[in-house]
Image (tube, rainbow, N blue to C red):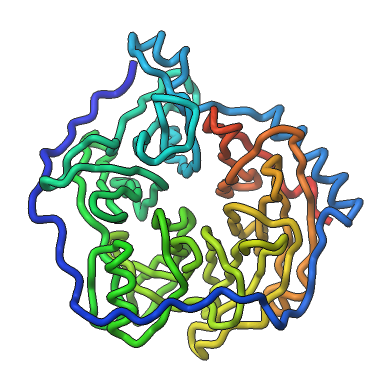
Amino acid sequence: MPEKITFAPPESGIFTPDVPVEPLPFLRNVPINGYRGYLRPTDDADAVARGKLCAEEIRRNFIADFERSDAYCLRNRETNPDRMVHVSTFTRLNGIIYMTYYANIGDGGERPESQAARFAFCPEDNTDDLTVVDLQKVGDTLDGEPIRLVYDTILMRRDEREIYLMWTAATSQYYRFYRVYDIAAKTMGPVRVNRFKVGDIVNDFSLSGMHSALSANGIPMRRTGVDIGIMQKVTERVEDGVTWYYTGAYSWYFNCIIKSRDFVTWEYVAAPDFPCFSLWENAVYVLGSRVFYFVRQDDCRQGFLTCYDLEAKIWSTPCLIEDSQSRADFIVYRDHLYLIHSPRNREGFGIVRVDTEDISRSVPVLVADMGSSLFYPFTRVYGDEVYISYTVARQHIRLSKFRLNDYLM
């Protein structure tokens, strides 16, 4: 039976006003006019052959689905199973799998005006013993403000005690919200607002808060729009004795590197300063003093891979990767950096071995075509196994695994 979770009472006074400033005009999106390297993974017959084997392994190694299915509702005497689910993030800890996503119980559409932010978990040895809870849903009230829209939902953790659950939702505009789940006590903290910091300016992490904080520091940004995202993968870097967690943030054409010490306040680091058509999710991975960065582009078939030097504060010339759409991810496997990228048809993923000394010399490893839906892959490495969560036709939040070593050149 589902675990009983105790929810903290709501708090008041959680919103703060933006620092007043005249906002800078938005930058225009323009095509990349200089790059080194252009990868076409589907032209590599060996990568395609390896991908076919990997796709078969992923099908064999199915672990569990995490949505509120008809079977889940029947087992737990509940009604209204999920009709749409999307965008997963997971972690494994002490024999438990924890998962987040967003869901619509009304119909099969991806419609933020009907969605809920979700948290689910189950024992690895009994995945039918699933607990699913709403973190926030449309129609809730937060500090006197009605929740009108709900979207991207993720989780992060620094230790074995707490999981930070974060999502975007709109009152008068989109904000990034979070709750903290205490694993041992099985208690869920109140909904609070993430903060966005640029220089000495700290605003709520909202559409206007980002624009205001950047403008106050003389930093122009690309146009934002519906939704605000924080990327699921965090990597650590120690700076002056303090551990910082790096990841990416995005809203429409605006994409940047951010970092945090506490998963609450996120500091702006940098955004690509060269012409590009950057769009939505930007994968970020820090190695030493360099941040590797990949993002899809609007109105073209190429995503771009680049690198930001944190000490020199310089972006490398990008390398283009053909047929890249939706969310990407980075992993380190056996001391090498790999990029996981998604094709436009959303039926699989590709893996590229990143040459960290010269990204233009990066090479495709495999191109996995599932022959059916595989949206928004997210990966974590445990030993020699790569665990992968993904959306199936916006109907299932699925977890599987494969051994990347079996497909390396």
Residue 376 lies, in percent from the top left, at: 58, 46
Q: Residue furthest left?
A: 12
Residue 306 lies, in percent from the top left, at: 63, 74
Looking at the image, which residue is at 58% across and 49% down?
A: 381
Residue 243 lies, in percent from the top left, at: 36, 70
Q: Considering depth in this image, is 387 or 220 the residue closer to the camera?
A: 220
Residue 320 lies, in percent from the top left, at: 73, 69
Horizontal side, residue 235 vs residue 274: left or right: left
Q: Is residue 106 above or below residue 287?
A: above
Horizontal side, residue 73 vs residue 30: left or right: left
Q: Is residue 23 above or below residue 344?
A: below
Looking at the image, which residue is at 28% across and 75% down?
A: 212
Q: Is residue 404 above or below residue 244?
A: above
Horizontal side, residue 113 vs residue 398: left or right: left
Which quadrant, please, contains the N terminus? Answer: top left
Which quadrant, please, contains the C terminus? Answer: bottom right
Q: Quadrant of residue 274?
A: bottom right
Q: Quadrant of residue 176?
A: bottom left
Q: Considering depth in this image, is 169 or 312 the residue closer to the camera?
A: 169
Q: How many marks?
A: 0
Q: Is residue 356 above or below residue 403?
A: below
Q: Residue furthest bottom?
A: 312
Looking at the image, which residue is at 25% across and 46% down?
A: 179
Q: Considering depth in this image, is 114 or 118 the residue closer to the camera?
A: 114
Q: Quadrant of residue 329?
A: bottom right
Looking at the image, which residue is at 23% across and 29% down?
A: 5
